[in-house]
Image (cartoon, rainbow, N blue to C red):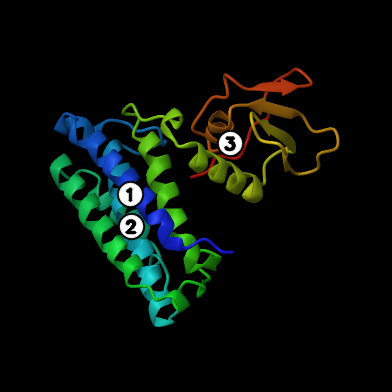
Amino acid sequence: MTMDPLVLLTDVDQATEALIRTASDLDPTVVSTPSLLPGWTVGHVLTHVARNADALTRLLTGARTGTAAGAYAPGQRAEEIEAGADRPLREQIADIRSSHDRFADACAAMPAEAWPFRLEFIGMSAAGIPWIRLREVEVHHVDLALGHTPADWSDAFALRLLKELVTGSRGPAMVLRPFGIEHALTIGDAAGAPVVSGPTKSIAAWLAGRGDGADLTVSPEGELPTPTRWT
């Protein structure tokens, strides 16, 4: 049975509110400080979170109306992020909240028959959009470098993110053994590949480029492989 896409919307609501709480408690000058993303300030990340919600809303609208909509026009993503990065913190927070409300409304307006509509822009059906939004909010909350870390992710989110990263990885071959997970996860050819073990959240964060892997072990003993960073 396929999960109802709206089941994840509660998680998206909670993740968005958590990010807003983090931003609301900060000095307004924080928007100009560096984030964990190279070349991006906190303001860039906050603006991206808002514009991503609008982009996914456009995709939902396309699925609902049966049109081949794109999330962004050529160059739109970078232009909008740069244009909004220096706005006051209060405006950034209001923008995230209002763009989230538009996204939630678009989800609620989707009839059941529209969720299977395939969107070439994301290479999957519209049913994957609530997960995409949750992933964006949770990972970029970490990127703000303002106290929210992968340790704050739920176990369910970390495991789903890990499985997605493994499926889409083009990085070096390795076998992953998260604690408490019965079956190993494999990237590339398992024959002779190093085995990386550790907490699920730590492995997911490391594969996503949001953790240093300090609490992971590798066998045979040696350096951890260098994964391809998710952006």
The spot of residue 67 in percent (x, y) is 43, 81
**Mark 1 sits on what residue?**
49
Q: Which labelled disc corresponds to residue 152?
A: none
Label 3 crowd (10 A; few <14 / some 14-19 / many >=20): many
Q: Are marks 3 and 1 in contact (CB under 8 Å)?
A: no
Residue lying at 67% horizontally and 41% vertically, measured from the top left: 171
Does residue 90 appear to the left or right of 194 in the view shown? left
Does residue 156 appear to the left or right of 86 in the view shown? right
Q: Are marks 2 and 1 in contact (CB under 8 Å)?
A: yes
Q: Secondary structure at mark 1?
A: helix
Residue lying at 80% horizontally and 33% vertically, measured from the top left: 193
The spot of residue 85 in percent (x, y) is 25, 45
Label whose residue precedes the other's in the sequence (3 or 2): 2
Q: Amino acid at mark 2?
A: Ala
Q: Amino acid at mark 1?
A: Val
Label whose residue precedes the other's in the sequence (3 or 1): 1
Name above or below for residue 92 compared with residue 172.
below
Residue lying at 85% horizontally and 37% vertically, measured from the top left: 191
Label 1 crowd (10 A; few <14 / some 14-19 / many >=20): many
**Mark 2 sits on what residue?**
53
Instruction: Determine the CA span between mark 2 and mark 1.
Output: 7 Å
In the picture as drawn, the residue positioned furthest to the right comes out as 191
Residue lying at 53% horizontally and 70% vertically, measured from the top left: 120
Q: Amino acid at mark 3?
A: Leu
**Mark 3 sits on what residue?**
207
The spot of residue 43 in percent (x, y) is 26, 41
Label 2 crowd (10 A; few <14 / some 14-19 / many >=20): many
Please state which of residues 145 and 148 is positioned toward the viewer in this rendering: 148
The spot of residue 157 in percent (x, y) is 49, 42
